[in-house]
Image (spheres, helix red, strand yellow):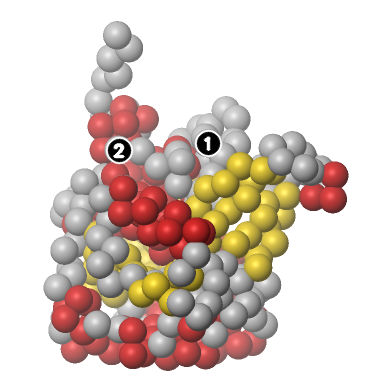
């Protein structure tokens, strides 16, 4: 298996109109969750991916499980929790492309994931274990699960990919800094956004941020710069890759997870650092073209057309 990842997936309710939710009466249902987003994005790019979590024994849990399975992601290690419910979130749209997000996840099935749910044999089959900073934020037991998974990966020479995915609605910056930087010390790949890197380590310059993580023993740092593109650096090379122009952004949620998938896809395909950046920028940009976390993620041929590596045949 190319990549294994785990974390909470939730049912997303997207309002059919803009404005305060108290004036919204209809919603569209979809699904979202950083790790699951990445798993689906990678599967669409042709990789073998496994995602696991805990979901409630309810209709929302079944919706998530069936949807992720339909995308070609292995869900054989997902646990159905008969005692807990599946988390949900609501988006709220005003005049920007970044929605307000309201979580209803405290005490959810996924928040009860623990070290006992981590299957060593499953993780050691993968080339890459991908984790995010969201999972350790949702509960103490989930944080323990993350550190156990990291330990297993290191013991079995599985590459560790880490997106800090800082969520200050879930914990304080002080606690986040402590836990996330500890995880980063064990990672081979770190993929922060520029703003969250500033909050975590107090540095503003991409090169300084990359050098900080490289000094911890990280092999590759990929910094997301939004519409400006990305900056990637390893021990031998650094590259800035300009972003792709998007005329009308519909939804930015899921773009960062798509970016991560592009980087990992490039690494798995043994592409150059610049090519990894191009894939990452392409998937991230295409995610913003459509409302929803996963709806805009491309298949490989679509991505090649978008980034100009293949001619598009109209008819």
Residue 197 in view here: no
- Front position in the image: 46 or 236: 46
| Element type where label 1 sits in the image | loop
Q: Residue at x 46, y 69 (%)?
A: 57
Residue 71 in view here: yes
- Front position in the image: 96 or 232: 96
Q: Is 249 drawn above or below residue 315 in the view shown?
A: below
Instruction: Find disc 2 in the rendering and name its residue.
Output: 299
- Mark 2 and mark 1 lie on one chain; the one further toward the N terminus is 1
Report x, y in % for residue 1: 16, 63
Q: CA distance from mark 2 to mark 1?
A: 15 Å
Picture quadrant where residue 78 is located = bottom left
Q: Residue at x 33, y 78 (%)?
A: 187
| Element type where label 2 sits in the image | loop
Q: The C terminus lies in which quarter of the figure?
A: top left
What number of labels is visible? 2
Report x, y in % for residue 209: 48, 70
Q: Is 283 drawn above or below residue 121 in the view shown?
A: above
Report x, y in % for residue 194: 55, 62
Q: Residue at x 73, y 49 (%)?
A: 92
Picture quadrant where residue 96 is located = top right
Q: Answer left or right for 197 relative to 190.
A: right
Report x, y in % for residue 240: 40, 50
- Residue 290 is marked as 1
Q: Is 19 drawn above or below residue 5 in the view shown?
A: above
Q: Residue at x 26, y 38 (%)?
A: 300
Mark 1 Cα shell of 10 Å, populated few (<14), some (14-19), many (≥20): some
- Front position in the image: 28 or 125: 28
- Residue 198 is marked as none
């Amino acid at each position: 298996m190319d990549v294994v990842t785990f974390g909470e997936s939730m049912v997303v309710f997207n309002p059919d109109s803009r404005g305060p939710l108290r004036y919204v009466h209809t919603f569209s249902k979809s699904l979202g969750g950083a790790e699951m987003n990445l798993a689906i994005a990678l599967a669409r790019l042709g990789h073998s991916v496994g995602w696991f979590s805990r979901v409630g024994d309810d209709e929302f849990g079944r919706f998530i499980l069936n949807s992720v399975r339909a995308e070609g992601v292995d869900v054989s290690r997902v646990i159905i929790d008969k005692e807990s419910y599946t988390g949900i979130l609501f988006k709220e749209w005003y005049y920007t492309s970044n929605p307000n997000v309201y979580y209803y996840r405290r005490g959810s099935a996924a928040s009860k994931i623990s070290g006992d749910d981590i299957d060593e044999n499953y993780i050691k089959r993968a080339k890459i274990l991908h984790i995010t900073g969201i999972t350790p934020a949702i509960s103490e037991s989930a944080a323990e699960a993350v550190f156990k998974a990291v330990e297993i990966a290191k013991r079995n020479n599985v590459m560790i990919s880490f997106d800090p995915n800082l969520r200050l609605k879930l914990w304080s910056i002080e606690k986040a800094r402590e836990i996330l930087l500890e995880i980063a010390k064990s990672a081979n790949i770190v993929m922060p956004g520029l703003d969250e890197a500033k909050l975590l380590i107090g540095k503003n310059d991409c090169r300084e941020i990359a050098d900080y993580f490289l000094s911890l023993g990280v092999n590759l740092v990929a910094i997301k710069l939004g519409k400006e593109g990305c900056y990637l650096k390893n021990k031998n090379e650094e590259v800035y890759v300009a972003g792709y122009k998007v005329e009308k952004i519909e939804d930015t949620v899921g773009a960062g997870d798509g970016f991560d998938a592009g980087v990992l896809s490039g690494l798995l395909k043994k592409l150059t650092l610049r090519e990894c950046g191009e894939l990452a920028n392409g998937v991230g940009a295409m995610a913003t073209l459509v409302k929803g976390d996963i709806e805009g993620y491309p298949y490989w041929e679509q991505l090649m057309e978008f980034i100009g590596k293949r001619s598009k045949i109209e008819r």
